[in-house]
Image (cartoon, helix red, strand yellow):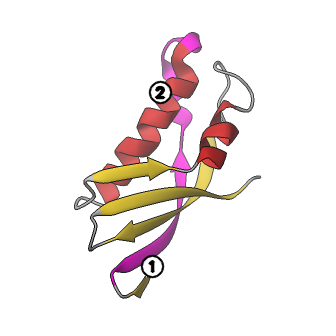
Amino acid sequence: MSESGGMVKSVHVIPLKRVYFGRRMNRADRAIRLVRKYVARHFKDAEKIILDPELNKYIWSCGREKPPRRVVVEIRFNKNEKEARVFLKRVK
């Protein structure tokens, strides 16, 4: 984690394996919710969580039924505004 002023940057690998345990038709929806839940758990002060459109496209890239098993993201948390922004770091 690197800090500069009120900004904290960190890279996380979020496992999305849990979304495969439920119904097939809702997997990408649940993957998005799981990413938000993961960020909320790791950045407890975050009142607002914003996902990058590229991350959303990547999760939905193989359709609703087959999201990726894991995703590498960069989370930028602004302490002053209590806002966490989630960006796609790299595609495997």
Indicate whether residue 31 is drawn in magenta: no
Quadrant position of the N terminus in the picture: bottom left
Is residue 29 at all visible to an observer of this figure? Answer: yes
What's the amino acid at mark 1? Met
Residue 84 in picture, x, y percent from top left: 38, 60
Where residue 1 is drawn, which disc sits there?
1
Residue furthest toward the bottom? Answer: 4
Q: Nearer the viewer, residue 79 or 92?
A: 79
Residue at 61% over, 45% down: 53
Identify the element where label 1 is drawn. Answer: loop
Residue 57 in picture, x, y percent from top left: 67, 38
Where residue 30 is drawn, which disc sits there?
2
**On screen, residue 90 above or below 54:** below
Which tag, 1 or 2, sits closer to the chain's start?
Answer: 1
Q: How many marks?
A: 2
The segment highlighted magenta reads 6-25
Q: Nearer the viewer, residue 11 or 79?
A: 79
Residue at 57% over, 57% down: 87
**On screen, residue 23 above or below 40:** above
Separation (CA) of disc 1 from disc 2: 27 Å
- Few, some or many C-alpha atoms within 10 Å of disc 2 (few <14, some 14-19, many ≥20)? some
Residue at 51% over, 25% down: 29
Is residue 20 at all visible to an observer of this figure? Answer: no
